[in-house]
Amino acid sequence: MSKGKRYDDAAARFDRQQLHTPAEAIDLVKSLATAKFDETIELAVRLGVDPRRADQIVRGSLALPSGTGRTLRVAVFASGEAAAEARAAGAEVVGADDLVARIEKEGFLGFDVAIATPDLMAQVGRLGRLLGPRGLMPNPKTGTVTTDVGRAVTEFQGGRVEYRTDRVGNVHVPIGKASFTRQQLLDNYRAVIDELIRVKPAAAKGRYVRSVTLSSTMGPGIPIDPAKARVTDEELAVPA
């Protein structure tokens, strides 16, 4: 089924079966991102894990060296000094019981990341049905349950992203915008790949990185050779 003329035209401009190096894929995805808006570049990695097993779930967060190209709306569940710290750091929404009630009763979800202090997690836990399916539930593993809310707000607004395997073992992470330079995208790409390899579960058996794909918001997926998924020093040294 056709996904649209722009998508079809882009897909016809390269061999969908050919595997690329990271640098080649970045150059290609940038050239195919021709929409009138600044398309997001997304990295999708299929991992050799069984997400049904708790010891094989891959989850965490990392700061992208070049940022994401967008400013995230951050909500913070905190009170007292921590709430003041969150507001000073630039959080859009800050509250405690009142914020929990607003989400519970009004269905308010006008934020991209939720951060909470540990003392409020008992109340925030009531929101699991609303926040969980949207990937908004604060979690210590992703750095969103913390006493240092000021730093967390700054990091997420500056380019920290969360990652987690879906039900079939895929991880999707935005690594920037089409307007980014090759160097910026390579730096972000390498940070994500290195992080996923670093957190490989001990229980994972066989080939760990099964497939790697880059795509823009409106464009087709460009396959990267999983055997060459890590960025080499030579690739980084090639001028854009």
Image (cartoon, rainbow, N blue to C red):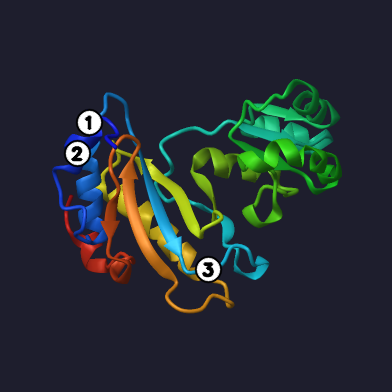
Q: Is residue 85 visible?
A: no
Label 1 to label 3: alpha-carbon separation: 34 Å
Left or right: 29 in relation to 54: left
Please tell me which of labels 2 and 3 falls first in the chain.
Answer: 2
Q: Amino acid at mark 2?
A: Ala
For this orientation, the residue located farthest to the top is 106
Q: Are marks 2 and 1 in contact (CB under 8 Å)?
A: yes
Number of other residues with Cα within 10 Å of mark 2, as a class: few under 14, some 14 to 19, many 20 or more? some
The secondary element bearing badge 3 is classed as loop
Label 2 to label 1: alpha-carbon separation: 6 Å
- Residue 190, given in percent of the width and then of the height, sits at 37, 59
Q: Which residue sits at x=20%, y=47%? A: 28
Q: Amino acid at mark 1?
A: Arg
Q: Which residue sits at x=21%, y=53%? A: 16
The secondary element bearing badge 1 is classed as helix
Left or right: 172 in relation to 165: left
